[in-house]
Amino acid sequence: MAHERVLRFLCRGCWLIGILHVPDQAIQRGVLIITGGPQYRIGSHRQFVLLARHLAAHNVPVMRFDYRGMGDSEGEPRTFEDIQDDLEAAISEFFTTMPAMKELVLWGLCDGATAAAFHAWSDPRIKGLVLLNPWVRTDQGAARTTLRHYYLQRIRDREFWRKLLRGRFGMRAAATSMGKLAVAASTPSAQVEALPDRVYQALRQFRGQILIILAGADLGAREFMALPRQHAHWRKLLAAPQIHQTVIPHANHTFARQAWRDEVATICTNWIRQW
């Protein structure tokens, strides 16, 4: 059995709201759920609530919360680039409220996963990362992924050819869109340090265990999958023994179906309890 408690704690003068899931016989490793934005602690399709209750039913203490500007927390809205103080406040509150807890796993979806990676390497209390469809978006990467997966899939779709033959498909608009994507796909990012490079550096510095879960039908996940095919340093990193990666075929970005959510919960629970 487990019970749930409301938490209220400060971050830079703003009150943040969280929910703590406390098992009757909690293990000493907890999980902090970090939302992807714009999102709050419930999650799409109640995913974060259901995941937290599943983990707590298996004796894993869990905390989920709204960072500043989201949900019931105070403050101005912010992006995943600007929530490191929020994460530190939540982590401190979690350890204070659960004094028997010895270590922590950060669990994040999309840019919440990326924010978790940015934070984890600098905090020795964090021993694990669960990253779902980590956000590594660049204009070039997004264009390549869209061309390779979205348009290729459309061409293989019978309904596409039916629309084309009936004159219901806008060839001119599609050609224009594909042309722009082709240009973007061949143009390197103008950023001084692209997001994939920053994520790579963060994961390379982290000394704990890493679980990566990717949705087979999500373009963002496909962009992440392309990194080891394109870059030797990513291949080497993801081949490390402390990194486990799995793909849930046909799942969308938020794992909207119950079967996909249940599979994510089972994978996470087994992984968290096995090391």
Image (spheres, rainbow, N blue to C red):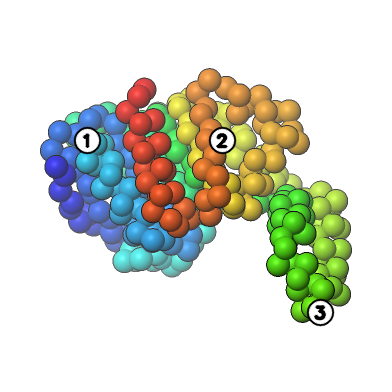
Where residue 82 appears, as percent x and y from the top left, is 50, 54
Tag 2: amino acid? Ala
Q: Can residue 45 be seen from the camera position used here?
A: yes
Q: Residue drawn 33% across and 40% down?
A: 31
Q: Quadrant of the N terminus?
A: top left
Tag 1: amino acid? Asn
Q: Residue drawn 80% across and 60% down?
A: 181
The residue tagged with tag 2: helix, strand or loop?
helix
Tag 3: amino acid? Gly
**Mark 3 or mark 2: which is in front?**
3
Residue occupied by mark 3: 167
Q: Nearer the viewer, residue 171 or 5?
A: 171
Residue 75 picture quarter: bottom left
Q: Residue drawn 28% across and 41% down?
A: 55
Residue occupied by mark 2: 202
The residue tagged with tag 3: helix, strand or loop?
loop
The residue tagged with tag 1: helix, strand or loop?
loop
Q: Is residue 14 left or right of residue 122?
A: left
Where residue 175 appears, as percent x and y from the top left, is 85, 68
**Mark 2 or mark 1: which is in front?**
1
Q: Which mark is residue 59?
A: 1
Q: Nearer the viewer, residue 44 or 134?
A: 44
Q: Is residue 4 left or right of residue 74?
A: left
Mark positioned earlier in the residue sequence (3 or 2)? 3
**Mark 1 or mark 3: which is in front?**
3
